[in-house]
Image (cartoon, rainbow, N blue to C red):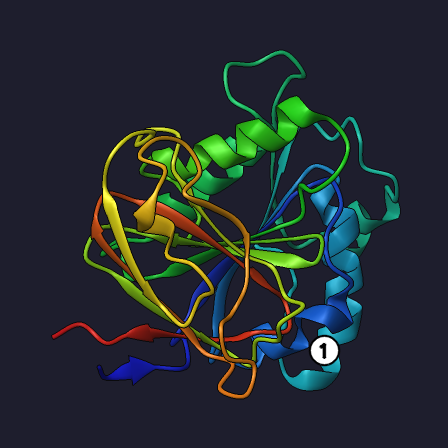
Amino acid sequence: MDLDCSLKSCKLVFIGGEAPEAGQTKEFFSRIRCVDNVIAADSGLDTLGQYHSFFKDFGLDFSPDLVIGDMDSLRDKSLLEKFGCAKKDFYPHDKDFTDTELALMKARESDGNGSSFVVLVGGNGGRADHFIGILDTFSFDYRPDCWLCGSQMVFFLGQGKSLVASGLKKSDYVSVARTTSFFEGGKIVTSGLEWKPDAGKKKGMPSLSNRIHDEKEGVASFFAEEGNFLVFLPLTAAFAFAKPK
C-alpha cells in the first residue's frame, strides 16, 4: 500500500465548544503543507485566535478568510476588529442550519474539485444535542474530513478509502463508528487492533474503546470496504492515507 503522509492543502473550520489546546495539534498540523482557507463560526473565532497566536511561529497563517454565524457566543469581541480584513457573513439567531453547518457549507463551496481536506476544530463538551448535530454532519456532502475535538481526532473514512495510524500505545483508545446515514451493514477491514470491529455488531457503533494488539509495532490500519465509517484516534497518533491508484 502506497501511503501519503502529508496533505497538500486543507481548509480549516473553527467552531465553538471545547477544542484541543493548540500545542496538542502540532503533530497533526506538521502534516499540512498549506492552509488555503480559514473559516470561523461564532465563538470558534475565540479558538482561532489562540491557534493563530501559537502557529504563527511555525509558518502557518490561521488568519480567517470568513467569519460566519450569529455571533451570540463570541467571548472576545475585539477579535472581530483584529481580523477586520476577514469577510463577515452574519446570520440571525433563529435559522434552519447551525453555524457549524453553514461554515462547512462555505468551506465546500470554495472546494471546486472536491480535493481539499476540510478540518473541523472544536465542538466538544457541553450540550449532547450539539455534539450529535456535529456527528450528523458526516452524513452530508458538506461533511468535514477530520474533526479535532478534545483529546481526539475523528477521521471520515468513505467507502473504498484506507487509513493507517501509527505511534499508538496500549493505553490509547481507538474506536470505529458508522455515520448516522449508514447505521446498519457495511464492512470495515482492520489490522493491528485487539479485536476486529467487523466481527460482531452489524448495527450502530462497531467498536468502542478498542486498542492496538502490539504496542511495540504501534500501527493499526483501516479500510472501508463497504459503507462510510468514522475512525477515532488520539491526537498523539500519526496518520497516513492510501494514495489513489
| Above or below, 163 relative to 182 | below
Looking at the figure, which quarter contains the N terminus? bottom left
Looking at the figure, which quarter contains the C terminus? bottom left
Q: Is residue 110 visible?
A: no
**In the image, what residue occupies the spot 66% across and 55% down?**
85
**In the image, what residue occupies the spot 71% across and 52% down?**
150
Is residue 207 found left or right of 245 in the rendered image? right
Residue furthest to the bottom in view is 216
Quarter-of-image position of residue 26: bottom right
Pick the front one: 120 or 110? 120
Quarter-of-image position of residue 27: bottom right
Give the x, y percent position of residue 18.
Answer: 76, 46
Quarter-of-image position of residue 225: bottom left
Give the x, y percent position of residue 86.
Answer: 63, 51
Give the x, y percent position of residue 130.
Answer: 64, 27
Secondary structure, mark 1, is helix
Q: Is residue 135 visible?
A: yes
Give the tally of numbered discs. Answer: 1
| Above or below, 129 relative to 163 | above
Pick the front one: 113 or 226? 226
Is residue 20 found left or right of 152 in the rendered image? right
Give the x, y percent position of residue 101.
Answer: 50, 32
Is residue 242 found left or right of 9 in the rendered image? left
Q: Which residue is mark 1?
A: 56
Pick the front one: 182 or 134? 182
Say which amino acid is labelled 1: Lys
